[in-house]
Image (spheres, rainbow, N blue to C red):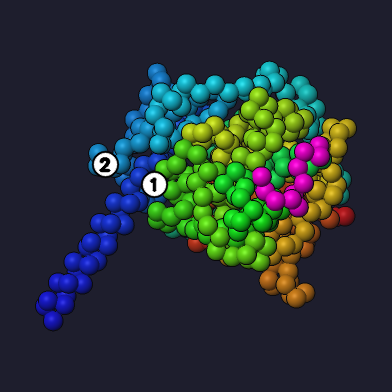
Amino acid sequence: MKEIILFITAVLLAYGIHYYWVSLPIVTGYVAKHICSSVFIADRSEEQYREDLDGFPMKYAKFNINYTDLSVTSSIFGLAQIKAIYRNRLGATLINELTEEEIRNQKFNVEISSDINQDQIPWSMGDQIDVERFPSNINKTQLENAINDLFIEKDLVNLIRTRAIIVLYDGKLISEKYALGFSRKSKFLGWSMTKSIINTLIGILVKDKKLNIDEFAPVPEWNNPNDPRHSITIKHLLQQTSGLDFNENYLTKSDVTQMIFQTSDMAAFAASHPLKYKPGTHCYYTSGSTNILSRIIRHTVGENEYHSFPYRRLFSKLGMKSFIMEVDGSGTFVGSSYSWGTARDWARFGLLYLNNGYYNHEQILSEEWIKQSVTYVGSNQYGQYGLHMWLNTEKNNDSSTRKFPNVPVDTFYASGFNGQNVFIIPSKKLVIVRFGLTRTPNEEYGANQFLKNVISSINL
């Protein structure tokens, strides 16, 4: 019996050592990248970025911020050291596979419209809000109570840590609130809400007739007609039905964590994976599919246009002046995860979808694209899905199967890690933005009740 106990102990110890050994570079990569972005893009205070990393095991990582070369280096007990560097208009990039010199020597054409003071420009292209014209059919006190409630910590163990809320009604910004230390000037990381940005850029190229999502995806690794991946279409990638054998597990070293924290060319890494299912037959959410799409955009618009494309064709047209998308070591936008913007800019993005692709006197996306994006194609381990948009659809006319059972079925939304959301509710003329640092089980912060309370304040 003693020998058995010793053997089991040794096996568990070996497993534990292996687990943490392979996980250390993921942890230090996360810390270096996040602090680099938080400091040099979002201008976060030390208290704020330390709060971001107060969970296990990130809180054990040490880091050094170099304000001279705009970098952050992180390690744990001196092990798994990794460096992230900030480059103007390109964001923070981890040094992986390529040398720091190779990455710093990259030259990209990034044209971003000059800074304009939006304070004197009326919403939505600017930040001037007409507070005198609050909609008469909305109970202002009830709305404010709904918002304030989401800033109250009811469980001191499972904190929801709401940082920003914005409510648009019929295109007008009618309410916003920020946690202490944050403001309308604060930039927030959208995490996987960036996927919905990529969907929008694809939609622009479809409108330009430069892409057809029903055609085979133009991915160099799949060019051979005999390759079973050759049959993957752009639509399959958007629907998360590519069938690629890609593991989206953030709790240990997996395909997604290796891609995000240990790979320089994320799209090439994702595209190298074999098929697990026949394309179009199985819905499984992967960040790899989005980064492949980001590289498809790059190849479609060309090297001269790519790094300016989101700013010229989307952000500047919506008044999203704060917005920054970050690139990987190869220079491709990390479409799965990395974009920063103020809560108001994220609200502007939601407004584009509420208005069926029409914004500031221009049809930026076709109405057909909006319809496709919010059409149910399948459910996966996270919920109902359209084209890189989450849906509140139900199964078999059973409202209890909806993600938000007390919210209209036409609700759709962008969703990101730790409870980032842009909700669009067409039937109620609403766009609702929520940012926070929520690490509760399933990142639950009471969204269903909150949305219900906001809707209840409106008398249509």
SS at mark 1 in the image? helix
Work out whether mark 2 precedes mark 1 in sequence or the reverse, and give the earlier one. 1
The quadrant in which residue 457 appears is bottom right
Name the amino acid type tagged 2: Leu
Reply yes or no: does residue 227 show up in magenta. Answer: no
Residue wearing tag 2: 79
In the image, residue 123 above or below residue 288: above
Q: Which mark is residue 26?
A: 1
Can you say whether 322 is above or below 196 in the image?
above
Residue 230 in view: yes
- Nearer-the-camera pick, 452 or 359: 359
Q: Position of residue 105 (x, y in %)?
A: 47, 21
Badge 2 crowding class, 10 Å Cα cut-off, few under 14, some 14 to 19, many 20 or more, is few
- Around disc 1, counting alpha carbons within 10 Å, would you say few (fewer than 14), some (14 to 19), or many (20 or more)? many
Tell me: 273 left or right of 211. left
Residue at position x 66%, y 24% in the image: 304
Q: Residue at x 84, y 44 (%)?
A: 366
Tell me how far mark 2 sits from mark 1, CA to CA. 12 Å
Residue 440 appears in the picture as rendered: no
